[in-house]
Amino acid sequence: APPRIPETLGNLSKLIQQGLAGAHPDLRPGGAGGAGGAGAGKAKKSVDKNSNEYRVRRERNNIAVRKSRDKAKQRNVETQQKVLELTSDNDRLRKRVEQLSRELDTLRGIFRQLPESSLVKAMGNCA
């Protein structure tokens, strides 16, 4: 039986994390390059966590995070639906191949039982 989607996605996530561990420092989470990484050339500003600006930024960030997670969940649901659809199509096509193979075997058997003289006549009519 094929693996369930969550198991496959979990394995993929582990593989990605392992791949990032051996990646160039700029590609690692929290690496030297990129936005917000250490050594990016800017010192972090001290932020007053009680300020109105901070609360507005946090609220906007929380909304953006929620939206991003919802989109990821939706993509996951769509992927799972697509997997089910393709699995069903695969099963249907496999059954069709089996049916056509049986039909071909039957026709071959009938063809082999025809007398050779009728085959020669049939080939002569085709030319």
Image: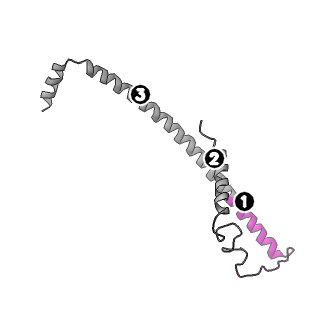
For mark 3, give the secondary structure: helix
For mark 1, give the secondary structure: helix
- From the viewer's perspective, tell me whether residue 120 is left or right of residue 15: left
Disc number for residue 99: 3
What amino acid is found at the position of numbered circle 1 in the picture?
Arg
Q: Is residue 24 magenta?
A: no
Comparing labels 3 and 1, the label whose residue is closer to the camera: 3
Q: Which residues are magenta?
A: 40-68
- From the viewer's perspective, tell me whether residue 104 is left or right of residue 13: left
Comparing labels 1 and 2, the label whose residue is closer to the camera: 2
Q: Are marks 3 and 2 in contact (CB under 8 Å)?
A: no
x then y, percent, for residue 103: 36, 25
Above or below, 2 against 121 in this view is below
Disc 3 to disc 1, C-alpha distance: 49 Å
What amino acid is found at the position of numbered circle 3 in the picture?
Gln
**Which residue shows up at 71% across the image and 73% down it?**
37
Q: Which residue is mark 2?
A: 8
x then y, percent, for residue 39: 72, 78
- Which of the two labelled residues, at mark 1 and mark 2, occupies the earlier sequence position? 2
